[in-house]
């Protein structure tokens, strides 16, 4: 039984290497129940470590997806509902979206204002477009310098 569990851990590590974190979390939770029931104390620490790794990366992937959607929609629309962002991201966790949007505003990744009463985001589209233009200019300048060296 312990060898079967160790083989399952190898499979779960492969899932994580393939960035299939949600699937690995489900598998690890099931495996943890079995390990606890069977009393394989030595494996619990390894499973907990893998669970922490998977949950951390799963959350990071969700935040990246939210940011990408918000940045994309923020230059197309002046105002968005959190529910619209959730639908576009295919996520049900509105609180994660709200927290991500607030962090993006605080970190000046977007120029916008969040309204909690209506759960909406009002974008300063011109400021966002200007910021993108600055980034594109900086990239072009860097590219010109780098490729002129050759």
Image: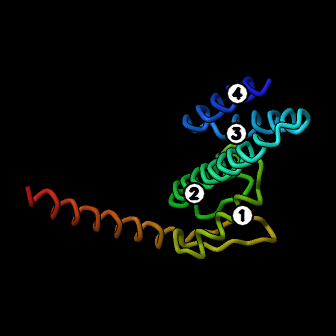
Query: Which residue reaches farthest right?
Result: 37
Q: For residue 39, which numbered disc appears in the image?
A: none
Q: Mark 4 sits on what residue?
A: 8
Circle 3/circle 1 CB separation < 8 Å: no
Q: Which of marks 3 and 1 is nearer the N terminus?
A: 3
| Relative image position of residue 53 (x, y in whole percent) | 65, 49
| Relative image position of residue 141 (x, y in whole percent) | 21, 66
Crowding at label 4, few (<14), some or many (≥20) Cα neighbours within 10 Å? some
Instruction: Look at discs 2 and 3 and give the one toward the viewer.
Output: 3
Q: Which of marks 2 and 4 is nearer the N terminus?
A: 4
Q: For residue 67, which numbered disc appears in the image?
A: 2
Instruction: Look at discs 2 and 4 and give the one toward the viewer.
Output: 4
For marks 2 and 3, give the CA distance.
19 Å
Q: Which of marks 2 and 1 is nearer the N terminus?
A: 2
For marks 2 and 1, give the CA distance.
11 Å
Crowding at label 1, few (<14), some or many (≥20) Cα neighbours within 10 Å? many
| Location of residue 13 by image quarter | top right
Which residue is drawn at the image coordinates 67% and 66% (left, top)? 121
Q: Is residue 127 left or right of residue 36?
A: left
| Relative image position of residue 77 (x, y in whole percent) | 57, 59
Q: Mark 1 sits on what residue?
A: 98
Dot 4: what SS? helix
Q: Earlier in the sequence, mark 2 or mark 3?
A: 3
For marks 4 and 3, give the CA distance.
16 Å
């Amino acid at each position: 039984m312990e060898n079967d569990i160790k083989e399952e851990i190898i499979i779960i590590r492969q899932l994580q290497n393939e960035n299939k974190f949600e699937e690995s979390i489900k598998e690890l939770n099931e495996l943890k129940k079995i390990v606890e029931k069977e009393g394989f104390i030595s494996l619990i620490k390894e499973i907990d470590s893998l669970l922490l790794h998977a949950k951390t990366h799963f959350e990071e992937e969700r935040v990246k997806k939210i940011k990408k959607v918000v940045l994309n929609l923020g230059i197309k629309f002046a105002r968005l509902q959190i529910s619209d962002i959730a639908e576009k991201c295919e996520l049900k966790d509105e609180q994660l979206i709200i927290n991500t949007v607030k962090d993006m505003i605080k970190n000046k990744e977007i120029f916008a204002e969040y309204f909690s009463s209506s759960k909406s985001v009002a974008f300063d589209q011109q400021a966002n477009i200007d910021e993108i233009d600055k980034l594109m200019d900086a990239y072009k300048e860097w590219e010109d310098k780098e490729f002129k060296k050759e």
